Image (tube, helix red, strand yellow):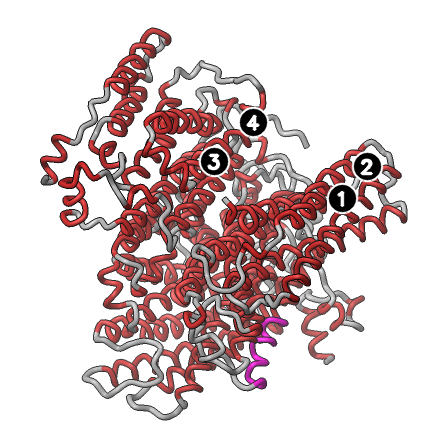
Amino acid sequence: MNEITTTLERAGLLTAAQREHWKMAWLSTVDHKRIGILYMVTGLVFFTVAGMEAMLIRLQLAVPNNTFLRPDTYNMVFTMHGTTMIFLVAMPVLFGLANYILPLQIGARDMAFPRLNAFSFWLVPLGGILLHFSFLAGGAPAVGWFAYAPLSETPYSSQLGVDYWALALLVLGIGSVGTSINFIVTVLTQRAPNMTLRRLPLFSWMIFVNSFLVILALPILNAGLVMLLIDRQLNTHFFLPLGGGSAIMWQHIFWAFGHPEVYIVAIPAFAILSEIIPVFSRKPIFGYEFVAGSTVAIVFLSLLVWAHHMFTMGLGHTVDLFFVASSMLIAVPTGVKVLAWSATMLGGKIRLDTPMLFCVAALIQFLVAGLTGMSHAVAALDWQTKNSYYLVAHFHFVFVGLIVFAILGALHYWFPKMSGRMLSERLGKWTFWLMTIGFNLTFIIQHFLGLAGMPRRVYTYPDLPGWGWMNMLSTIGAFFMAAAALIFVWNLGSSLLRGKLAGDNPWNAWTLEWATTSPPPHENFHELPPIRSRRPLWDAANPDRPDPIVGSKWKAEITAPEKNKAGVIAFIFSETGFFGVLILAYLFYNARPQPGPGAQDLNLLKTGFFSLALFASSFTIWRSEVNLQRGKQRAMTGWLAATILLGGIFIIGQSIEYHGLYKSGVSVSSNLFATTFFTLTGFHGLHVCVGLILLLLLLGLAFAGDFKDGHSPALKAIGLYWHFVDVVWVFVFSVVYILPRI
Amino acid sequence: MTTSQFLISGWTWNVTSIALIVLSLVAYLVVFRDRRRIGWFTAALGVLFLTLISPINTLADGYLFSAHMLQHILLLLVVPALFLLSLPRSLSLAVRPHFLGHPFAGWVAGVSAMWFWHAPSMCNAAVSSAPVHALQTGSLLVLGSLFWRQILAPRDEERLSPPGAIMYLFSACVTCSVLGIIITFAPVTVCSIYSMPPANHLELLQTIRSGWGITPERDQQIGGLLMWVPMCLIYLSAIFAQIARWFSESKTPVSVKI
């Protein structure tokens, strides 16, 4: 133990005062830098797990007709490899990196909501443990990381594995949304003076933009997971064609999330490239505006093209045609980025240190991934290659070739800032070359395997001409990558102990994180340099030829909203996606009348009355806010109590309705009407209950005299949430109760 | 009837529409002295001509839901946008009463025009009754102008700033995409009148069904997809323009108060 504390202390990661309780100092931390490191260490642990799973997969596939793994074991390993790499490696490591770097780059002291930050982080180990607990609870999920229905449904996967999978992803999804709300609000409200939005370094800008994608896309998956869990636990039929459900619906939901998810992990990789390539080319980025703007374009386009993952599903030529065209559009903004990075290097004084080597390789490999990606956008070609190793090669070029390489580049680049010590350049070069050779050996060959017809998602294959040696080469390549990973971990450990001291700015970089000590003090900065452009440290070092001043043009780039309000608005955006999916599902499943209970069994008048109570509560909470502003403490408390009363009446009304339905024999598994009805109104009711708890807390604070100064961001924020819950009910009420009657 | 015959004979030489197009051109010339932007105005009239006179109109008139959707998109999004771009830059569009100028009113105008006219009863009525059809055309142009006013008003200070405009456009895009998704995948017919087109033109119907291969189901799918994908791309193009505006060099810096 003493060695650990000594190491941490020497690396500046622990203060002398915390030496005695170093575990608590780390486990209870709300400091963004420590949370960032915790994220990355967690990601590294799961990387080891998922990496070993990858090795098992490659060992099984090394020779034809292999019996090393049993078929169902292979399916489990294969599912866990994919799920872990995406949700427990790529996302936590990138979130961790952003957690560490983003507040420093914008000159902030910490994230906007440090406790929410810690909460979001701790959901990652929880989700990871839930997912891996399935091994002990009768077997891990064996349905692929996409968990296509009906395979993922109880009749075909009766073990608990899929339930743990869904629960884990739900937990991780909530954590990701929490972190992303935090990033958005941090960028909007915690920037240093003069760090206007248009002066943001590209890394911070891209994480900011990417966070919007997370809060829009993750709730779609969460809604799907909830429906899958209800199917499995309560015997309903959302995705089971046997009971009138639709298996295609799962695919729509999954890929409506899944396609943006690719960009959720790719955009931070773009962000890393945009930061490292200019520093090691000794030139500012070529076309900052284009790189920054194309990121926004990617975010919006990525939400529009998910159906290209379903070309082989038989959606029909008409649908395919539209998505071929829109998918091809994505090549434009990504192409803009590739050009900008290349042009940055052109004519620059390139320094090929390890971080830059990784970024250059990532750039080239991403180009390959993009080109094979375009070939998948063509539906006719996609039908031939979608279910072959060609696709496996394609997405590993994205996930490993771009993202893992970018992460490795970023860790080599920012490790000195985090620890105060340089990573060994010699070991770094070994890591790089082993990784690059290994990666390309493993995955280039898989393009040809796919074109030769080898299907993916199979546990073994017959001894067809060429398949055997190509797979063997692929497996050998995987061992190179494993060796690279081992050297990297060794490098991390040994450099932490004995690495060369880094100093504040070892790479001569230009963004604010390099303006403080390595590692930064608890409060990040003692003093900030003047910020007039996008490269404040360049300006400080070259006062005779500073960058042109980036002026301010828009009020929005200077002013900051109130942080609680901004947080709740971001949360509302995210919840809109969740309810949107549930409402669409309700409309879809109830488009045709079905046997059994239906909308005609609902009592419009009774529910209408209780709904009025809920709508009225929006008025009362508004009055409460107004009275608080006027300093009328008692009136404010009264209106607040009235709000709680009205919300309570609504919940009682809903309970009476549920009770009545239950007594007449309608339960959640009666038919799809009942399933969708209880799911939609139930989740709304749950939100009302959460709102009521928050309002009761406020009431308690009001009685304790907390709002004496006539100002409370909490009341405003919770008021916004409460209005949102009411607005959702307007839609639910119209769709469920009114629409069937007209 | 072959396709080429239809392309020649399928024009709707409606006197009212033509008169309106000519009159508005005259009105533009009379009202505005500054005619530098008349190109935009003729473009708007050209699209209007295409929408109301060309064979698209014939197809939309009871044969193809997808043609109706194309008309709908052109009238709501393209013609009003071109019209606003054609106005002299000094013109103020401040409106009374004040709430009509509020972004929320503009947003509701643009989005509700989509949803309202695609309620099954309204969609059918607009095809079967001439006055309702005229009302639909007029309302789309007016509501579309109200929607775009927030983005394309001639004076810069009457437009939304880029972050607000992006939210405005993106949320409108999502809302219309959702309707497009519903129409594309609806297991039921949205606009039933198109599945039983007028019996007096069986020839054209045969060309559409067997020549072009558009069944009523596929027709509805194309309609939904037009709203889901290309229409969303119109909003996205406007978003890209906003990004360009956001990053463009500042002419009048805002004073920074710290």
Residue shown at the point (9%, 35%) measured from the top left: B5
Residue A715 image label: 1
Q: What type is the residue that disc 1 sits on?
A: Leu
Q: Say above or below: A158 vs A417.
A: below
Comparing labels 3 and 4, the label whose residue is closer to the camera: 3
Protein chain holding label 2: A
The residues bearing labels 3 and 2 have C-alpha atoms spaced at a distance of 36 Å
Towards the viewer: B128 or A483: B128
Which contiguous range is marked in magenta?
A125-137
Question: Do callouts 4 and 1 mark residues in contact (Cβ within 8 Å)?
Answer: no
The residues bearing labels 3 and 1 have C-alpha atoms spaced at a distance of 32 Å
Q: Say above or below: A119 vs A322.
A: below
Question: Do callouts 2 and 4 mark residues in contact (Cβ within 8 Å)?
Answer: no
Residue B24 image label: none
| Crowd around label 3: few <14 · some 14–19 · many ≥20 (10 Å) | some
Q: Residue A688: horizontal and vertical position, in percent?
A: 69, 53
Comparing labels 3 and 1, the label whose residue is closer to the camera: 3
Tell me if A686 is positioned left or right of A373 in this view: right
Protein chain holding label 1: A
Residue B102 image label: 4
Tell me if A63 is positioned left or right of A88 in this view: left
Mark 3 — residue?
B112
Residue shown at the point (22%, 33%) measured from the top left: B58
Towards the viewer: A449 or B215: B215
Q: What type is the residue that disc 3 sits on?
A: Ser
